[in-house]
Amino acid sequence: MKKGNQPAEPYRIKSVEAIKLLSRHERLAKIKQANYNIFKIDSADIYIDLLTDSGTAAMSNNQWAALMLGDESYAGARSFRRFEKVVKDIFRKAFVIPCHQGRVAENIMFSTVLKKGQYVLNNTHFDTTRANTLHKGGIPVDLPCEESKSHEPLPFKGNMDCRKLEEFIREHGAETIAMVIMTVTNNSSGGQPVSMANIHEVSEICQRYKLPFYFDCARFAENCYFIKRDEPGYAGKSIPEIAREMFEACDGVMMSAKKDGLANIGGFIALNDEELYGRLTELLILIEGYRTYGGLAGRDLEVLAVGLQEVMDFDYLDFRIEQVAYFGRKIIEAGMPIIEPTGGHAVFIDAGEFLPHIPPEQFPGQSLVVEFYIEGGIRVVEIGSLMFDSIDEKTGQIIHAPRELVRMALPRRVYTNSHIDYIAETAHSIVNRKDSLPGYKIIKETKFLRHFTCDLDVMVPREEKVKP
Ligand code: F0G
């Protein structure tokens, strides 16, 4: 592992996009107008946008060139064949189903395979995976490893707990489980990677109990980098070799290609089961489009074919993962506690620990989200009780998220380390007045994925008044 030896960007900038910082009183007015929901603020009013690393990557010159090669034919387009070949090579599967983003892959998969009341087991479900499972009548169960709760900077804290997996299968019976999913990297658990040893162990258990084993592999290349860097026996292997070993251990994958596809839109399912391929594409044609475009333009498929290969470049990944680590060190220096080690795509601040005076039902993470916008025009996102609260079916009690986190996701190839230094300075200013940060309450919400659209209000009105 490198220490204090930051690699420089393995690319130079060819096209730029201007960003602007609104004044403090404008920012205060905007966040109030948005009912303290950061999703409701226009990007023009954001200075640095760390809401997500999804669909926000900067494309390379080769991707822009590939765009012009798009074949927009309805059926059997050349662009699909190119995309299909790349996906088959990397993910080692016989059938490829394009779709426009990851949650559609989940929707199509769960609508087709999930019987009402069946479980879906995951190291940790991402919010759309969880919501899609629930929406189709399934029960999502998270089985993160014990180490995921530790405050020690251990490697591979994204792993699944194999003992709990086997216990669950034995207790409930394999027939009650629709599939086992491994999310790489484990987004909802701090973007932590999963080790190859853990992948093999889960694969072996699934084979023994004849359970389908799928990857939710939005950030597969970042996961491969961690295996190469930190898992004994993999230093000498290339990223494509590691990816091959990973995907040969599973029955299929669902991917949001808006992350490690280095593209602004796209997703797919890849699998070996021909009969299931047939059933999945029936629904695909109904809701997305024909088998060879699935809701994407030919040019999108071209961009993805290039992006999926570029993302496995070692120098790119080395810079990417070390930039996230640099970001994490800067936030710690500023005085905020984060999940350590940093994962692949984001720095996760432990807002519960940072703001102990705000209880989970008043959303400490959301309080920090609001403050980053007011202080620096920076958009970050809550990954805590606002996103993940659930109701205990038996007692009717609210179950809070296991941790109150704030995610600062880094778009790929977009921000420089000088942007990161600015974010760290903003964090430092917030640290200086952290005890005055208020809690929030929900005043309007929806049943599924409420964090996207809910309205909030501050528990104790801010002293800082918006100037007329
Ligand atoms: N799976 C994982 C692990 C994800 O991180 C996401 C999206 C999805 C599935 C759904 O994919 O957005 O293409 O429909 N994550 C984004 C994020 C939204 O900000 O982490 P999608």
Image: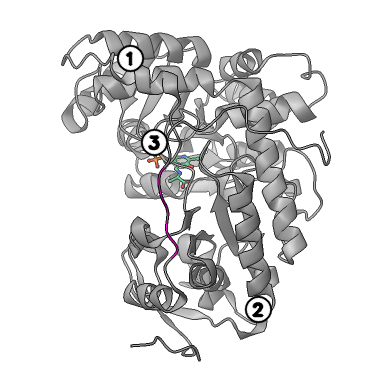
The quadrant in which the C terminus is found is bottom left
Figure check: 217 above or below 397: above
- Look at discs 1 and 2 and give the one toward the viewer: 2
Q: Earlier in the sequence, mark 3 or mark 2?
A: 3
Q: Residue at x 37, y 60 (%)?
A: 39
Disc 1 residue crowd, few under 14, some 14–19, many 20+, Cα 10 Å = few
Q: In what element is the residue under mark 2?
A: helix
- Amino acid type of disc 2? Lys
Figure check: 183 above or below 97: below
Q: Which residue is mark 3?
A: 102
Disc 3/disc 1 C-alpha distance (Å):
22 Å
Which label number is shown at residue 434? 2
Q: Position of residue 356 (x, y in %)?
A: 68, 77
Magenta-tinted stretch: 17-21
- Look at discs 3 and 1 and give the one toward the viewer: 3
Disc 2 residue crowd, few under 14, some 14–19, many 20+, Cα 10 Å = some
Q: In what element is the residue under mark 1?
A: helix
- Amino acid type of disc 1? Glu
For the question of whether residue 60 can be seen, the reply is: yes
Check mark 3 vs ligand 1: CB closer than 8 Å? yes or no.
Answer: yes
Q: Which residue is mark 1?
A: 275
Classify residue 398 as left or right of residue 466: right
**In front of the other: 411 or 35:** 411
Classify residue 131 as left or right of residue 345: left
**In front of the other: 105 or 369:** 369
